């Protein structure tokens, strides 16, 4: 089957991808979607009875080419100590605008997960710290973003079957989910903070002058992903929790050169804390889902 994104309208591409995944996962009905950023993909190993699909097996899915992004979709259950269960779809790695894809294709996996039933998304990333009070290894709950990509994922014709032409972004990062994450973090002894994430096209890291500009604009964090995914998630009516792992301080704040190796090393160092936080958030979501069914 062709993977040419120009051969089919977006809605048709999505339904072909959904149908392919549905034939593999059968009666499983995921309600939570996870996007696992650089160095954070191992969280998917915690899912019970996983079903794994390489992106290459899913028609129209873009293929990840970045080190640390496995390029696999993992469907499995997270089970709380009380025995409550939530079915998740986890993206082990994402694709980025800088890899050469347009943003409609970059965000196609997000739309696919939502159409499969994942109306709650936990979107994670490795980020540079713009706010000098942050430290490498710190986890930050995203409360807003600044979009500095040169194009938008909703550019072009709008399909009302997916969402409205002009979606509101006032609550792009769901306040209830943010409060839940902060509460869970407090219970773990984590002093989680909230911050504004600036999304840039990459792949070059920002210059010191650009970091000073981002600070003046109100950004606390910066990275090369997340923002387009959050836009389409809101367009499609899903609620979003964003979590950044500060893997390095941004250019000009330390004087040290930046590298992807530093990003993955820091993500690996805080992996257990990150995984514990996401796991406990999912336990809370499983409890919430059980309550809603009563």
Image: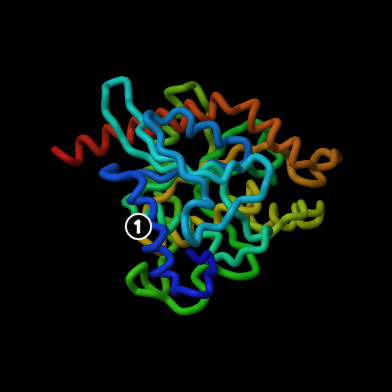
Residue 163 location (% of width, % of height): 36, 68
The residue most toward the front is 1
Could you tell me which secondary element the residue under label 1 belongs to? helix
Furthest-bottom residue in view? 157
Look at the image and name its color scheme.
rainbow
Horizontal and vertical percent position of residue 12 = 39, 69
Q: Quadrant of residue 227?
A: bottom right
**Residue 194 visible in rendering:** no
* Residue at the (44%, 74%) spot, across then down: 9
- Give the residue displayed 27% in from the left and 23% down from the top: 83
Position of 196 with respect to 216 (left or right) is left
Q: Which residue is mark 1?
A: 19
Q: Where residue 100 sits: x, y (%)?
A: 67, 63
Q: Front-most of 260 and 52? A: 52
User: With respect to residue 14, does 27 lie above or below?
Assistant: above
Q: Residues within 10 Å of mark 1 (few under 14, many from 20)?
A: some
Placement of the C terminus among the 4 image quadrants: top left
The residue sitting at 54% across, 32% down in the picture is: 42
Residue 1: percent from left, percent from top: 47, 64
* Viewer-closest of 166 and 123: 123
Q: Name the residue: 53% across, 74% down.
A: 6
> Can residue 42 be seen by looking at this rendering?
yes
Q: Is residue 217 left or right of residue 87?
A: right
Residue 3's place in the image compared with 92, above or below, is below
């Amino acid at each position: 089957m062709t993977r040419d994104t120009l051969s089919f309208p977006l809605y048709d591409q999505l339904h072909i991808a959904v149908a392919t995944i549905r034939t593999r996962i059968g009666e499983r009905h995921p309600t939570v979607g996870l996007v696992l950023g650089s160095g954070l993909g191992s969280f998917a190993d915690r899912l019970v009875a996983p079903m794994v699909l390489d992106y290459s097996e899913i028609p129209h899915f873009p293929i990840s080419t970045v080190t640390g992004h496995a390029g696999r979709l993992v469907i499995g259950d997270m089970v709380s100590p009380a025995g409550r269960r939530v079915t998740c779809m986890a993206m082990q790695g994402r694709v980025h605008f800088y890899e050469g894809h347009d943003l409609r294709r970059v965000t196609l996996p997000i739309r696919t997960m939502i159409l499969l039933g994942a109306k709650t998304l936990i979107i994670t990333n490795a980020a540079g710290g713009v706010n000098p009070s942050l430290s490498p290894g710190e986890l930050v709950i995203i409360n807003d973003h600044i979009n500095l990509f040169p194009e938008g994922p909703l550019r072009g014709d709008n399909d009302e079957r997916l969402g409205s032409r002009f979606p509101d972004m006032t609550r792009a990062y769901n306040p209830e989910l943010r409060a839940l994450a902060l509460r869970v973090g407090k219970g773990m002894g984590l002093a989680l903070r909230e911050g504004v994430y600036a999304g840039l096209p990459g792949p070059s890291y920002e210059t010191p002058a650009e970091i000073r500009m981002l600070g003046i604009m109100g950004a606390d964090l910066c990275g090369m992903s997340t923002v387009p995914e959050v836009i389409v998630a809101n367009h499609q009516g899903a609620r979003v929790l964003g979590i950044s792992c500060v893997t390095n301080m941004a250019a000009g704040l330390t004087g040290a050169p930046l590298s992807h190796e530093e990003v993955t090393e820091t993500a690996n160092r805080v992996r257990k804390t990150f995984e514990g936080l996401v796991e406990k958030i999912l336990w809370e979501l499983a409890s919430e889902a059980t309550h809603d069914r009563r």
